[in-house]
Amino acid sequence: MALNEVPTLIRWGVTPFLFVKLHVVPTAPRDLQLSLTQLDPPIVLVTWTPPLDIQGPLSGYKLTYGVVGDSYIEERRFDAEITRFTTGFLGLY
C-alpha cells in the first residue's frame, strides 16, 4: 500500500450537528478526504470542509469510523472550527 492510499476496509463518516431546539440539520460536510500519512504504524489524516447550508450556528462535527465488517465503531466529536483529525488506526495491521 502506498502513502495516501487508505485501505478499502475502512469506513468513515463525518456528520455536522447543531444544538438547537428546532430539528434543523445542516447539509453534509464537503470534500471528505482520507490520506494515509504513515505506513507503519498506519496513521490516517481525515479532512473536510464545512457544509454549504448550515441553517443556523454550527455546533460541531461527529466523526465515526471503524473497520468494514467489524461491529466496533469509534466516535469522536469536534468543535465547529475543527476540520481535520489524525489517528493511529484501530490495529488493522
Image (tube, rainbow, N blue to C red):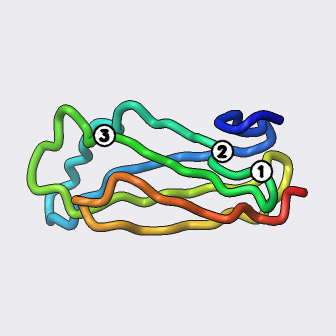
Residue 49 is tagged as 3
Within 10 angstroms of label 1, few (less than 14), some, or many (20 or more) residues?
A: some
Q: Please identify the quadrant where the N terminus is shown.
A: top right
Label placed on residue 90: none
The residue furthest left is 56
Q: Residue 82 appears at what percent x and percent y?
A: 30, 59
Q: What amino acid is labelled 1 in the image?
A: Leu
Name the amino acid, label 3: Thr
Of labels 3 and 2, the one closer to you: 2
State if disc 2 and disc 1 touch (CB < 8 Å): yes
Q: Is residue 15 left or right of residue 70?
A: left
Label 3 environment density (alpha carbons within 10 Å; few <14, some 14–19, many ≥20) = some
First-in-chain label (3 vs 1): 1
Which residue corresponds to the image point at 46% horizontal and 48% vertical from the top-left?
14
Q: How far apart are marks 3 and 2 (CA)?
A: 19 Å
**Residue placed at 31% from the left, 40% from the top?**
49
Looking at marks 3 and 2 on the same chain, the residue that comes earlier in the sequence is marked by: 2
Residue 22, given in percent of the width and then of the height, sits at 15, 57
Q: How far apart are marks 1 and 2 (CA)?
A: 7 Å
Decide: marks 3, 2 in contact (CB < 8 A)? no
Q: Residue 39 carries which label?
A: 1
Pointer 2 local density, CA inside 10 Å: few below 14, some 14–19, many at least 20: many
Depth check, mark 3 against mark 1: the one in front is 1
Q: What element carries label 3?
A: strand
Report the residue at 56% width, 57% height from top: 64
Q: Distance between the residues labelled 3 and 1?
A: 25 Å
Name the residue carrying label 2.
36
12 displayed left or right of 53:
right
Secondary structure under tag 1 reads: loop
Depth check: 49 or 65 in front? 49
